[in-house]
Amino acid sequence: MIRADIDIKTYFFTVNQVTKEKDNKLIYGINLNNTSYFLSKTTGVKDAIQLDDKLPLGAEIIKEINEVITSIELKYKKLPSLRKFNTDIFGMLMRLRQFGINSFKKVTG
């Protein structure tokens, strides 16, 4: 189930922190529609999973976050500053939204 507050509007997200772990894993603190989430993923691999105990993000939202973050990881040899990271995220999501692409499907009922 997609969270109602995410489903009612096109979302954007920002990265607030990145923590390096062993085995090429990173913990991303993201802010999505004014709610903080934590995701774990392998650098350069689209394998993010939600770590926090908040209502789970939908599979399509995780998929898009995965694709955006992974493309930025692959673009740079080292992780860029949070400012640069978020500038790239915003640019990618703006291009997707201009073409009417949202990662989630509106739930009707």
Image (cartoon, grey):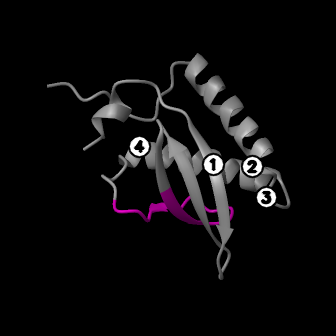
Give the residue pinned by disc 4.
60
In this rendering, the label closer to the viewer, 2 or 4: 2
Residue 42 inside the magenta-drawn segment: yes
Which callout, 1 or 3, points at the residue further toward the start of the chain?
1
Q: Is residue 70 left or right of residue 75?
A: left
Q: Is residue 1 left or right of residue 53?
A: left
The numbered mark at residue 15 is: 1
Q: Residue farthest to the left?
A: 109
Give the residues in magenta. 38-53
The numbered mark at residue 82 is: 2
Total number of numbered labels? 4
Q: Is residue 48 visible?
A: no
Residue 77 figure quarter: bottom right
Cα distance in 3D space between marks 1 and 3: 12 Å
Label 1: few (<14), some or many (≥20) within 10 Å? some
Cα distance in 3D space between marks 2 and 1: 7 Å
Residue at position x 56%, y 22% from top? 97
Residue at position x 68%, y 61% from top? 44
Cα distance in 3D space between marks 4 and 1: 18 Å
Q: Residue farthest to the right?
A: 77
